[in-house]
Image (cartoon, rainbow, N blue to C red):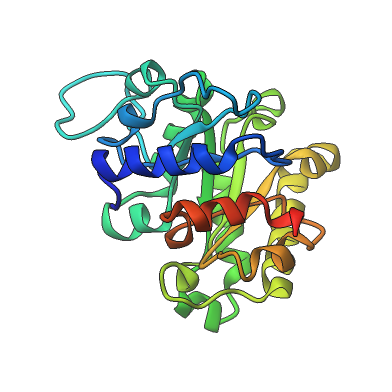
Amino acid sequence: MYNGPENGHIFLHKLEHKLHNQKINCDFAIAATFVTLPYIMPHDHGNNKGIEIDLCAQNFHYQDEGPFTGEVSLPMLEQLGVRYGIVGHSERRQYFNETNKTVNLKVKAALNSSIIPILAFGESLAEFEKNKTNDVIEKQLKEGLAGISKGQIERVILAYEPIWAIGTGKTATPKQAQDTIKKAREIVADIYDLKIAEKIRIQYGGSVKPENIKELMKQKDIDGALVGGASLDPDSFFKLITYDQD
């Protein structure tokens, strides 16, 4: 819940300036708050040589419309040109009663839209300290992906974010992140098959910043990053998406 319309517009202007004639070797998107998304909608980015700045929603409802005051639907987001939507972020689970069941409904709804779901999963500090990480993420993934076919799963992006590393300054070591994401890939292989497990994108989230992204991205099974605080500043955001160009 940062960067309203005014700051979002300024952010976009600064980022576009930094992207001018810059080669970017990764896919990236801005997951702005709902009121800010219209101010950074896809448009002609001028001389940026076709660099596309994709938008991502932080959450959405699984119904297309209805008496759900305060909610935002996928068709509404599609009208803004949003490409991605985060499902089951730890803060949604912790503060807003998100469950594996609602996560599953949202993933299915997204798969019936043009928006690509980013399914977040991860364990709490208590679960981590009790060595329950693997059990927790297996339950989250199996229930979150229930009823999703092999043909559909290839559109889903997974994001491992240990709750104890969200906004705390703590970060899973590259080895911890790699080990858990490798386990997640094995779970996907168990649900579907090895080919799908190797193909699906799995990101790491949890106090990712320019100082540690390069080491995280060296890990075999980490395909990207879901970034919080370090993405709020355009300079930091730019460093994150150009981590491989130092």
* Residue sticking out furthest to the bottom: 129
Q: Is residue 34 above or below residue 133?
A: above
Q: Is residue 96 above or below residue 33?
A: below
**Left or right: 6, with 53 as reference point:** left
| Residue 197 rendering spot, x and y as whole percentages | 78, 43
Foreground residue, 16 or 84? 16
**Left or right: 51, with 244 as reference point:** left
Foreground residue, 17 or 215? 17
- The answer to whether any part of residue 241 appears in the image is yes
* Residue at horizontal 61 percent and vertical 57 percent from the top: 138
| Residue 118 rendering spot, x and y as whole percentages | 54, 41
Q: Quadrant of the C terminus?
A: bottom right
| Residue 131 rendering spot, x and y as whole percentages | 60, 79
| Residue 52 rendering spot, x and y as whole percentages | 58, 28
Q: Is residue 228 above or below residue 83?
A: below
Foreground residue, 55 or 192? 55
* Residue sticking out furthest to the right: 195
Q: Quadrant of residue 20?
A: top right
- The answer to whether any part of residue 225 appears in the image is no
Foreground residue, 102 or 122? 122
**What is the count of numbered marks?**
0
